[in-house]
Image (cartoon, rainbow, N blue to C red):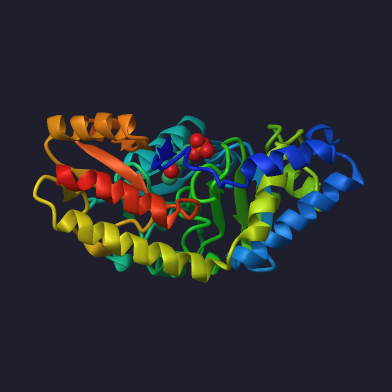
Amino acid sequence: MISFYPGPSRVYDAVPAYVKKAHRKGILSMNHRSPEFEALVKKTVALLKSKLSIPANYTVFFTGSATECWEIIAQSLVRDHSTHIYNGAFGEKWHAYTKKIRPAAEPFVFDAEMLPEAGALKFPGSEVICFTQNETSNGTQVPVPMIKATKKNNPKALVAVDATSSMGGVALDFTAADIWFASVQKCFGLPAGLGIMACSPAALRTTKEVNERNHYNSLVLMAEMMEKWQTPFTPNVLGIYLLKSVLRDAKPIRRVEEQLTLRQREWVKFFSASEKFQLLVRNPEARSATVIAVTGDSRHLERVKADAKRNGFLLGEGYGALKRDTFRIANFPALKKREIRELMKFLIPYT
Ligand SMILES: *Cc1c(COP(=O)(O)O)cnc(C)c1O
């Protein structure tokens, strides 16, 4: 079965061998206070920075998931007021989780087909402005220049970006925001259970000022521990080792992005030529590079999904309210050109 699910998604073929190697090298029982662990974290952070072009002065943290990052931001960076700019289910969830911790969290909802004007995104009372850069549920994206403009237009606020399904696939300009996070079961081609968060010096200053220390994952505590390449809790050591291993094999992010952009164009061409399928997102500027959302008659889609599964292709279900009316195809780096061709060939009779 080839998984085209946009998370958890296809893992790299090398993963089973890396797991075996981890076992052989004692990684599976590695103590998280040992010098070996510190060296592993240090190396993994260095690889993340070099392969993804994360600025040297950003601090990288390891968490359990992207969802955990939502809570960390609400707890440790927002005192009262955050703003959540979104058009889909993940952005909405982020707002909902934040609201439970900081009730003044405000939504700014925009249309999936129409990106807001950057000039309209001014939130004077907001301490943290939150973007879902790649909305996995509906296959839309927010261009990074818009995020950058928002940061410039709101100099007092921090900007936080959920890049869960784009980091590792798209070349992100990390200077455009203060907090970026993702989890590894999307573009990194790894099993779930590890989140990555990168914070600017300004974000670290704020977390020290806020000085929230009530949680095991309070960011100020995590920052103190990360100074010695450690975490407050026992982290997913195997996950970190696997991340290090696949990053070492990875091409620089610009090259990865080039390849994914070409593949996305092929998918767009494929579905644009179809009678029975339509791309869910018509505005090319708003369309995600890494998640292709396809719509059509729900009975037809149901048949396609079921037949695909019987033929060894796992398509992504529609998400939330879009469950029956869409399917999603991951355009993640671990998928092979040959696998994409095979899926296209399978889909042709249904177009
Ligand atoms: C998958 C996803 C999440 C949730 O990730 P977890 O690792 O399950 O917490 C959050 N935001 C976006 C945009 C996602 O695609």
* x, y percent for residue 193: 60, 35
Residue 14, image x, y percentages? 62, 47
Residue 116 in sight here: no
In the image, farthest residue toward the right: 35
Q: Residue at x 56, y 42 (%)?
A: 69
Q: Is residue 209 left or right of residue 338?
A: right
Rendered view: 3 above or below 124: above
Residue sticking out furthest to the left: 275
Residue 7 lies, with reference to residue 177, above or below; the image says above
Q: Nearer the viewer, residue 334 or 243?
A: 334
Picture quadrant where residue 154 is located = bottom left
Residue 185 on image: x %, y %: 53, 42
Give coordinates of residue 350: x percent, y percent: 16, 42
Question: Would residue 307 be seen by someone viewing this image from the given angle?
Answer: yes
Compared across the picture, whether 266 is left or right of 219 comes to left
Residue found at x 11% / y 36%: 297
The number of callouts visible is: 0
In the depicted structure, whether residue 320 falls above or below residue 90: above
Q: Is residue 334 above or below residue 305?
A: below
Q: Nearer the viewer, residue 348 or 29?
A: 348
Q: Splitting the image into 4 quarters, where does residue 215 fall?
A: top right
| Quadrant in which the N terminus is drawn | top left
Residue under the image location 54 percent in, 65 percent down: 174
Q: Quadrant of residue 55?
A: bottom right
